[in-house]
Image (tube, rainbow, N blue to C red):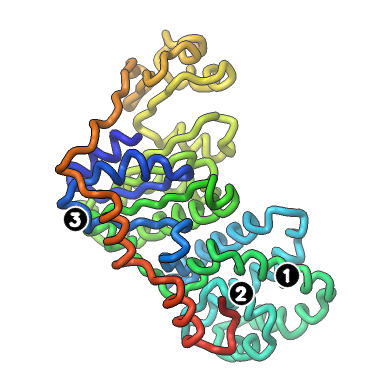
Amino acid sequence: MADMIIQDILNGNGVGVIDPHGALIREWILPRIPKERKDDVILFDPADEEYPIGFNMFQAETPLERRLVKNDIVVAFRRLFQDSSWGDNIATIIRTTVDTLLADNSRVYSLLDVVNMINDEGFRYEVLERIRDPLGALKNFWLDLYPSYQTSTIGALKRRLFDILGDPLIGNILGQKETTFNLRDAMDNRKIFLASLSKGILGEHISNVFGGLLVSKIQLTALARAAQATESLTPFYFYVDEFQNFTNESFKEILSESSKYKLYLTVAHQFASQLPTIIRDAIIGNVGTWFIFNSSHKDGRAIAGELADEITADDIVKLPRFNTFTRMGTAANTFTMATILPSEPTEAHANPHEIIEASRAKYCRAQVEAAVAEEEDDDDEFTF
């Protein structure tokens, strides 16, 4: 995967990478970016606490975007809760809160306003006065149903939200009002978007939350290019390592529709059992090129049927390291291939530190600046 990413960068293509370990970006990609492409890099690194990048999940313009964004935010919260406190009542409150904030087109909210909506009655009534709610369902929930929830349920929800959003790895990025990078611009103008989501630093659940949100954002951005003639679109090459951690049911839409918007996907995972059936079927039905490395007997038996007739599960299990069975198009067109490591960095490549500094200057805000900006935006609201 590293070699393919580097080759796309050398070819001047637009590239996106979701790296759940950080090593792919840190050790292989950043040291091999040509000097002339240094300013094309957007580095999304939640572990860089001093210079948080802004990412507001609530930014959505069309009804389709609002529907997908709502689902993504609810999934993100469910992942962040990661314990038994998530139940039907909590899910209903979170989903209705997100619905309500998205129904107010007069301003842009952030993740911190979820807390404000639940915690601040005055803030809640101000929002309800502005929302578009033709059937009255949202107002009915907040005025009639919400007060009936047990105090213990609301208290537990508030404590969990404060714990989650009080984590600077989350609050300093998702709490900003403005998304400071533009993925549509990255796609259209051949930028290099690198998301370093190291599980070892962030924790698995935070890494998965950011990865899932970014994958969905890429999907929304690609769909927004539908109004443009296909032949005029700039190709964008999107790589996702361990993509099973970032998928939801809508991911099948990316697999089946992405080529229409010249979004070209390369996804990697280790075990077939990691994938939900609906995603596994979407891969088998839509992916054009497969690289199969050595695997377990169980996965070998599942995969062999998708390759040429003469290839068995034992053949897949016995593949040497760095060798693959490669399928291009139909199963009949399967062959073996040895992969190679990328060449070593040279003086023609930019200094990784300079790339990081250039990205910080363009897309990040110093932690103090971000906090001050949030406080000035509304002193009455929940801020860090």
Residue at x 47% of width, y 83% of height = 107
User: Label 2's element?
Assistant: helix
Which one is closest to the eye, mark 1 or mark 2?
Answer: 1
The residue where tag 3 is placed is 232
> Residue 62 occupies which quadrant of the picture?
bottom left
The answer to which of 353 and 211 lies nearer the viewer is 353
The local crowd at label 2, few if under 14, some if 14 to 19, many if 20 or more residues have their Cα within 10 Å, is many
**Residue holding disc 2:** 114
Q: Position of residue 67 (x, y in %)?
A: 52, 65
Residue 88, position in %: x, y? Answer: 75, 61
Q: Nearer the viewer, mark 3 or mark 1?
A: 1
**Which image quarter is the N terminus in?**
top left
Q: What residue is disc 1 on?
A: 159
Residue 299 in which image quadrant = top right
> Which residue appears at 56% of the width and 85% of the height?
131
Distance from the alpha carbon under mark 1 to that under mark 2: 13 Å
* Element marked by disc 3: helix
**Dot 3: few (<14), some (14–19), or many (≥20) neighbours within 10 Å?**
few
